Image: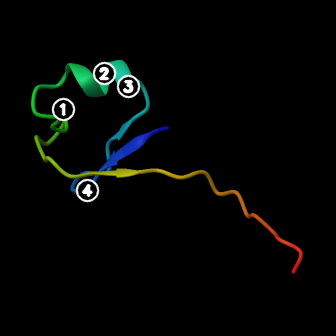
Amino acid sequence: MPYKCGRCGYEITDLREFESIPGMRCPQCNYRIFYKVRPPIVKRLKV
């Protein structure tokens, strides 16, 4: 699952790259807040 930087929008898809960063910071801008990028899948339920 990819993660996106809250400041610059840099996406990290390889978790090994994400874990190798000490303190979990963005390699581009050094920001600490990341958001999980969710796939655009619509789930429909019968009610």
Q: Residue at x 17, y 25 (%)?
A: 21
At a point 25% along the width and 56% down the height, the residue shown is 6
Q: Nearer the viewer, residue 8 or 16?
A: 16
| Quarter where residue 29 is shown | top left
- Please report the residue visible at 10 percent of the width from the left and 40 percent of the height from the top: 30
Mark 3 vs mark 1: in front: 3
Q: Are marks 3 and 2 in contact (CB under 8 Å)?
A: yes
Residue under numbered circle 4? 6
Dot label at residue 15: 3
Q: Secondary structure at mark 3?
A: helix
Instruction: Give SS at disc 4.
Output: loop
From the top left corner, tell me how far across and down residue 14 is, in percent.
41, 24
Say whether marks 1 and 2 touch (CB < 8 Å): yes
Label 4 Cα crowd, 10 Å radius (few <14 / some 14-19 / many 20+)? some
Task: Give whichever of 44, 28 is nearer the camera.
Answer: 44
The answer to whether 32 appears left or right of 44 in the picture is: left
- Cα gap from disc 1 to disc 2, whole angstroms: 9 Å
Pick whichever of labels 4 and 2 is earlier in the sequence: 4
Q: Which residue, given by chain and number where applicable, does mark 2 sit on?
A: 17
Q: Secondary structure at mark 2?
A: helix
Q: Residues within 10 Å of mark 1 (few under 14, many from 20)?
A: some
Q: Is residue 6 above or below residue 23?
A: below
Amino acid type shown at disc 4: Gly
Which residue is farthest right? 46
